Amino acid sequence: MAKEAIIRQDTADYNAAVQTIKEAILRSQYQAAKLVNREMLSLYYGIGRYISANSREVFWGTGAIKTISERLRKELPGLKGFSQTNLKYMRIFYEEWSPIIEAKNPKSSAVADEIDTDSLLPVKSSTTADDLEKFLNLSFSHHIIILAEEKNIEKRWKYISLAIENKWDKRFLKTQIKENVADKYGAMPSNFGVTIKDSRDAIKALNMFKDEYLLDFINTEEIGIRDLADIDERVVEQEIIHNIKKFIMTFGRDFAFVGNQYHLEAFSEDFFPDLLFFNRELNCLVVVELKTGDFKPGYLAQLMTYLRILDDKVKKPHENPSIGIVLCKNANKDFVEYVIQDYAKPMGVATYRLSEEMPEKLREALPDVEELKKLL
């Protein structure tokens, strides 16, 4: 009898849970046409809070979330997004953000009998209206990837911002988090702080570039190069040109490709910078000089020449001064910071790496190119 009573109680609990979640979904759908994404996030947060309270603090019984999901599909035929897995994701969404929300908004901490779909969303210590706007416009699936892959709260906010600004799809977002790009933006050694007059523009420029780029679309096997040391600047440049869309996605947002080996002339002297872009947000030309070896101070002098000619002869009157980036294989950041400050044009130095960088032990185990020729 006791067992039957428990079963009846579980059924009653599930029935109540199904009806509560069903009503919340229906209420939310009335407003969805107006604010689709933010309304859905609020709904998922409220459902997550309800499930968390009943599955963590009150014993619903084994398999409760699965049972509720199945019942919801029967109650609302054609309903999508409320599988057992997604209901658990909603619980995670609530549990990960609720300490921040409820610390700032005590009135949202109580778990009501009904789900509040107007729950306030997270704020951090320095939250701006722009931060919250980005949070509310990021899809739920993107949020779940960030929560699963990144535990640092400040980096989570950074990825929310980067995903919105750069229109990253879910797969690319996951890759970027694994590459820890949140630490790479704003870390590039540069002289922007002293060469860009408006401090807001200087910060914007610094946050536009990473200190390291992964050029994983350059396949050294396909271009017939066994030893990475044999790759020269022109090879890297040509691979970038052939994959310009991928490079721009890697490089950042709002870049438009102007040309490669762009011809500059001053006093009958000819110059050909490797890559030239225009950035809409910074409203300026961006010249990129490729180097396959270690950073050398002379690269900055070369870049300075390009920037002077670009600003004198190519830049439009309404555009900001041009920015130069040296993209090299290796660089000592402290040394770059030391030598770059004396230059009067805005410049920075970033590094890159290829996906085909072979471990030394594996490289040593392979036969020599000449030996392969003899075998052939």
Image (cartoon, rainbow, N blue to C red):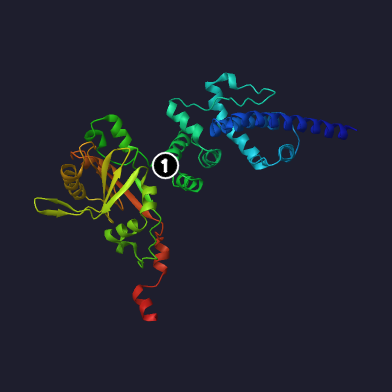
Residue 154 position, x and y percent, is 45, 33
Point out the image quarter for the C terminus.
bottom left
Residue 332 position, x and y percent, is 29, 46
314 lies above or below 215: above
Q: Is any part of residue 332 visible from this angle?
A: no
Report the side of 69 relative to 254 (left or right).
right
Outermost residue, top side: 107
Q: Quadrant of residue 345?
A: top left
Q: Quadrant of residue 15?
A: top right
> What residue is shown with label 1?
166
Residue 230 position, x and y percent, is 30, 64
Residue 179 position, x and y percent, is 44, 47
* Identity, as a three-letter code, of the amino acid under mark 1: Asn
Point out the image quarter for the N terminus.
top right
Q: Residue at x 55, y 24 (%)?
A: 120
Q: Is any part of residue 285 visible from this angle?
A: yes
Mark 1 crowd level (few <14, some 14–19, many ≥20, 10 Å Cα): some
